[in-house]
Amino acid sequence: MFKTRSTTPCLGICSTTYGDDVCKGCKRFVHEVINWNKYSSDEKEVVNSRLEEFKSLILKDRFEILDSDIFESKLKENAINYNNSLEPLTWIFDLLRAAGSQELDLSKFGISVLEAYDPKTIKDEINDELLRLSEAHHQRYFKKA
């Protein structure tokens, strides 16, 4: 399925229904989750751009895409859900999420590892870091002191 920069980042595991200000699944703010279907394409793109920026920030020191064509081909071959309109570096987040604790030979995906990591914990580490960035951003712009 072709995706656009305004495609929902929803992962189907929303925690905003339990009172979280930031969804632990997709990392959108509660008001973004609630109002997503009312947002214009431009508003949706702003949200996806923020999430893309945070993912890139987290992943750029850990991984390098050597061949985005191979990477995209392998994602399709393995039926891994990713947003092809976003930077290929962000697809690593989707790959690791889909792999769970399964070890991957990332070189077969056209990816170089820049920093040693534990395949059993890397997904959670990246997910936690993304959540912290999203929560800090939410706190900065939406919480009154």
Image (cartoon, helix red, strand yellow):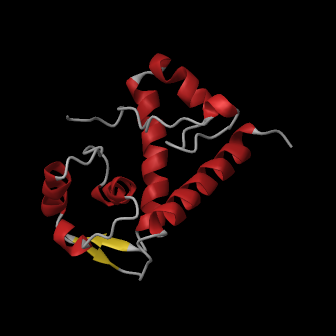
Residue shown at the point (37%, 60%) measured from the top left: 96
Which corner quadrant holds the C terminus?
top right
Place residue 35 in its image quadrant. Answer: top right
- Identify the residue at horizontal 36%, vertical 32% (top origin): 6
Q: Is 1 located above or below residue 60 in the figure?
A: above
Q: Nearer the viewer, residue 125 or 134?
A: 125
Residue extending farthest top: 38
Q: Is residue 68 above or below residue 45?
A: below
Identify the residue at the far right of this view: 145
Q: Is residue 51 left or right of residue 112?
A: right
36 w.r.t. 143: above or below: above
Residue closer to the observer: 100 or 134: 100
Q: Which residue is outermost to the front?
A: 102
Please indicate whether residue 90 sits to the left or right of residue 26 in the image.
left
Residue 37, position in %: x, y? 46, 19
**Which of the pair 89/122 is nearer the observer?**
122
- Residue 119 to residue 95: above or below: below
Q: Quadrant of the N terminus?
A: top left
The x and y percentages for residue 142 are: 72, 37
Find residue 132 and report its horizontal and vertical position in percent. Answer: 63, 56
Image coordinates for residue 103, horizontal then vertical, percent: 32, 70
